[in-house]
Image: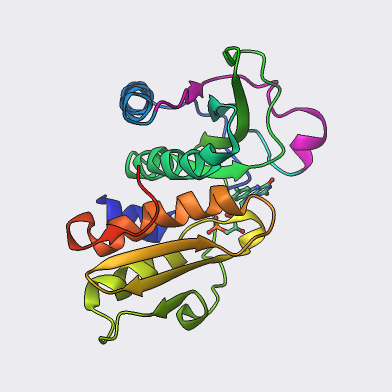
């Protein structure tokens, strides 16, 4: 599955089978999480086979979850965006390996997560094999999520970036972001507020880059 197919086929899954992650998927994900940490300065961690992490009230929402990505990083709210951006990279790599996921703001019992001084765990992403497949979410019309201040017609790469961003998971499916095309192939990405909207923006930007092609544009005021 290529990364474009992974974006299309990823949907939040809230019910998992008992099957542990395959050795190959686990090994590849551990390696990829390490790469993401090196590039980002985050401290993302993969926790596997922790059946107690989603007990209690969490079990009412996420069934049979035992694996997750702990989105840990420096305790700086400016890094909410990075949490979404880098976490979604892992989500899409997982999907390419046949592993389903769900971003989960209610956290996990973090028994086996390492949180160093000055760090915090912002959110988790549940990972596993879906017992019940997810379904495509309802989307706002693309016209509500983008603007054109370039003075030219929207280029194809921008349209494809928006289409990819529309596939991004957002908290409560709120889709509170806006991408604006500026002159000179520059794009401004903005959060429109709401809970977790900076994490959502990072996720949406990860999708936008894949859809638009990083080589086609530069970000106006967001650099990673
Ligand atoms: C930052 C964030 C937090 C989320 N928190 C939860 C959550 O606590 N519980 C839950 O069931 N889904 C949660 N989700 C999943 C969203 O509800 C889901 O992404 C959205 O409805 C779109 O559906 P899709 O992921 O299938 O495309 C969260 C998603 C994001 C991006």
Q: Residue furthest right?
A: 57
Q: Nearer the viewer, residue 138 or 78?
A: 78
Report the magenta stretch's main SS. Answer: loop
Q: Is residue 130 visible?
A: no
Q: Residue furthest left?
A: 215
Q: What x and y, as percent, mark residue 67?
A: 55, 27
| Vertical relation: 116 (above or below) 138 | above
Give the number of callouts. 0
The residue segment tinted magenta is 41-60
Q: What x and y, as percent, mark residue 179?
A: 43, 68
Q: Nearer the viewer, residue 14 or 34?
A: 34
Q: What x and y, as percent, mark residue 75?
A: 60, 27
Q: Which quadrant of the rendered structure holds the C terminus?
A: top left
Residue at the image position 33 percent from the left and 24 percent from the top: 38
Q: Is residue 222 visible?
A: yes
Q: Nearer the viewer, residue 101 or 104?
A: 104
| Vertical relation: 57 (above or below) 13 | above
Residue at the image position 68 percent from the left and 58 percent from the top: 194
Residue at the image position 47 percent from the left and 22 percent from the top: 43
- Whether residue 157 appears in magenta in the rendering, the answer is no
Residue at the image position 64 percent from the left and 49 percent from the top: 196
- Whether residue 53 appears in magenta in the rendering, the answer is yes
- Left or right for 89, reference 47: left
| Vertical relation: 37 (above or below) 90 | above
| Vertical relation: 149 (above or below) 52 | below
- Left or right for 213, reference 206: left
The answer to which quarter of the image holds residue 93 is top left
């Amino acid at each position: 599955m290529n990364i474009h197919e992974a974006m299309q086929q990823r949907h939040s899954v809230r019910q998992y089978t008992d099957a542990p992650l395959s050795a190959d998927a686990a090994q590849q994900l551990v390696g990829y999480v390490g790469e993401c940490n090196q590039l980002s300065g985050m401290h993302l961690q993969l926790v596997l086979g922790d059946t107690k992490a989603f007990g209690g009230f969490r079990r009412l929402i996420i069934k049979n979850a035992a694996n997750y990505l702990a989105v840990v990083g420096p305790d700086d709210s400016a890094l909410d965006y990075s949490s979404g951006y880098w976490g979604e990279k892992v989500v899409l790599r997982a999907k390419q390996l046949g592993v389903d996921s769900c971003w989960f703001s209610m956290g996990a019992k973090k028994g086996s997560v390492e949180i160093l001084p000055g760090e915090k765990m912002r959110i988790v992403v549940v990972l596993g094999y879906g017992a019940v497949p997810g379904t495509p979410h309802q989307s706002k019309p693309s016209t509500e999520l983008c603007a054109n201040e370039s003075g030219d017609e929207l280029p194809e790469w921008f349209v494809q970036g928006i289409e990819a961003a529309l596939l991004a998971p957002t908290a409560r499916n709120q889709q509170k972001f806006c991408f604006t095309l500026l002159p000179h192939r520059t794009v401004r990405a903005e959060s429109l507020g709401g809970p977790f909207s900076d994490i959502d923006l990072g996720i949406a930007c990860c999708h936008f880059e894949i859809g638009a092609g990083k080589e086609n544009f530069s970000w106006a005021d967001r650099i990673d």
